[in-house]
Image (cartoon, rainbow, N blue to C red):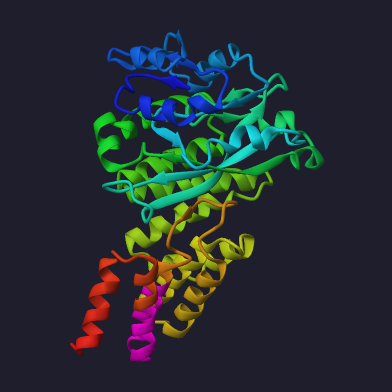
Amino acid sequence: MIVKNEGDCIGRCLNSVKHAVDEMIIVDTGSSDDTIDICRSAGAAVYSYEWNDDFASARNYGLERATGDWIIWLDADEEVDEADADKLREMLSGTEADLFSIQLINYYGKQADDYHVLQMAHPRMFRNRMGFRFVNPIHETLNITEVLTTPELQKRMVLAPIKVRHYGYLDEIVDAKQKGDRNLSLLFKQVSIEDKNPWLYYHIASEYYRLKQYQHSFQYVNRAIVLFLSEGMTPPSLLYKLKYSILLSLGSFHGAYPAIEKAICLYPDYVDLHFYKGLLLHFLGKTEKAIEAFDRCLELGDHQWSHLTQKGLGSFQAWYYKGLCLEQVNRQEAIHCYEQALLLHPDHQEAALALARLQTGE
C-alpha cells in the first residue's frame, strides 16, 4: 500500500489481511499523524517516499521491496471481506493463473450499507517478478497488456472469489480529504503531458460528475469516447454508463434516447444501460417500452462483474420503477412490484410510500 495520513482507517485495512499474508509493505508519502505507528504495530514494514505527484511511481517503489511470490495491492480505505481473507492462500495453491481480479465493492452516499454500492471486477493480485508494474501518475493501474500480450495469455487473468470493500468515496470522506480538487489538479497536469490519453478525460469527467458539474463532465466524457474511437477501439462500457448518467442528471431525455440503443448494442449484457433506457422511456411517457426495459434488468440481475454496476438496478430499483410504470396500467401488478422491491430492500422509502399510497387508495 501507499499511504499518507490514514490513521483513521489503516488499522482496519491491515487487520483484515495480516493473518493471510507473509509480509505487509507500506510506502508512506509524508504522514504527520499516527499512520506509521499503527502500521508498525501491526507488523508492517514502512518505507518513506518523497511524494512526486505520481501514484504509480510510489506503488512501484513498494513493489520493488516485495519478496513474496504473489502481490495483493490495496488502499488504506479498503478492507478484505472477513469471510474471504482465508481463501487467499487456498486460491493460489496450484493455480495456473497469473493475475486475479477481485470483487471491488465501492460504497457511496452518506454511510456504508449494502444497498448503496458500485461494484466491479478489479485486477489486484498478481505473480511477482513477471514484469507487472504500475502505470499512470493518477488512477494508477497495472500494465496488463504489456505482460499478458496475447488473448491466450490473457485467459490467465481470472475473477477471484474475494470481496474488497472500499469506503473512500463516502460523502464525508470525500469532503474531508478534498479528493475531487486534488484529483482534478493531478489529472489536468497529466493532460498537459499526454493529451491523447482517453482515460485521463474519463477520469476528469468522473470527478466533475461527483462534483455535480454535469456540463463539464459531459464535455470530457465525450472527449474520451472520441479518442477511443479515433484509435479504432471500442470505448469501455463505463464511459457510456457515465455519459447517460450525466444526460439523466441534466434532464436531457430526448438527447439520450434513442441514442442509448447504440451503446446497448455494444454492451447488451450491461444492466445499468438497460436501466437508464427504462428511465428515459418512463420520463418520455413510453410506458410499455419502459416496462420491457425494466424486465430486462430483472433478467440480467445484480451479479455482474464485467462492468461497473450499481447495485439494485437489476433488482429492487428495477422493481420500483416497473411499479411506477404499472400504476396507470394495472394497480395490482404495481403493488406486487413495490412488494418485491421491499423484499429485496426493506428500507426502500420510495417503494414503501408508493405501496402505502396504493393500498390506502390515495
323 in the magenta segment: yes
Residue 85 position, x and y percent, is: 53, 36
Q: Residue at x 41, y 26 (%)?
A: 186
Residue 162 position, x and y percent, is: 56, 42
Q: Quadrant of the C terminus?
A: bottom left
Quarter residue 286 falls in: bottom left
Q: Residue at x 56, y 24 (%)?
A: 21
Q: Main secondary structure of the magenta part?
A: helix
Q: Residue at x 37, y 56 (%)?
A: 115
Residue 284 at least partly seen = no
> Would residue 306 be found to the left or right of residue 168 on screen?
right
User: Residues in magenta?
Assistant: 319-337
> Would residue 191 be found to the left or right of residue 94 on screen?
left
163 shown above or below 317 = above
Residue 322 at least partly seen = yes
Q: Residue at x 49, y 61 (%)?
A: 272
28 shown above or below 123 = above
Quarter residue 321 falls in: bottom left
Quarter residue 40 falls in: top left
> Would residue 110 be found to the left or right of residue 41 on screen?
left
**Along the line of sight, which residue is nearer the eye, 199 or 134?**
134
132 shown above or below 302 = above
The mark total stands at: 0
115 in the magenta segment: no
**Along the line of sight, which residue is nearer the eye, 244 or 23?**
23
